[in-house]
Image (tube, rainbow, N blue to C red):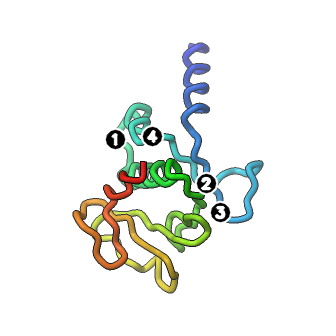
Amino acid sequence: MQKANTRQKCFLEEHVRNKYFKKNITDLQKPDKIYLDNTNLLYALCPQKPETGTVRETFIANQLASAGHTIEYAGYKRGDFRIDNDTVIEVGGADKGYGQLAGQEHSFIAADDIESAYLRKIPLWAFGFLY
């Protein structure tokens, strides 16, 4: 059993690369969010089906990081992510409203279950082209 735990720990250390902090937080402190490197790992490691919001956020973080963007955890009241210190992204479903983005310039919703962009809503699948 000890070998299995060691293997699991090594596996997680290899694939947990996306640790996000609010602004001015150092790596020595506890991160606000930790995302696996790939959404498929969520399904492999979770005994039940992973939460839809976690899968969506993991996907966005992975795609933006692979495209070379700087990602910062924005906090629940101001969107999910701040990209390149400028753009705020809130991740959600088709019915996600703009409440969390009120008063913020350069803010968008990455919405699942929509086919095309409308106003400041971008389809979640479109971020897959960044890879």
Disc number for residue 38: 4
Q: Which residue is mark 1?
A: 49
Kind of residue at badge 4: Asn
Measure the C-alpha gap from mark 3 to mark 4: 22 Å
Q: Quadrant of the N terminus?
A: top right
Are the two marked residues, 2 and 4, in contact with CB atoms closer than 8 angstroms?
Answer: no
Q: Residue at x 38, y 64 (%)?
A: 110
Disc number for residue 22: 3
Q: Residue at x 42, y 80 (%)?
A: 99
The mark that comes first in sequence, 1 or 3, is: 3
Measure the C-alpha gap from mark 2 to mark 4: 15 Å
Residue 103, given in percent of the width and then of the height, sits at 51, 86
Horizontal arrangement in the rendering, residue 69 relative to residue 96 (left or right):
right
Kind of residue at badge 2: Tyr
Kind of residue at badge 1: Lys
Q: SS for tag 2?
A: strand
Q: Nearer the viewer, residue 98 or 88?
A: 88
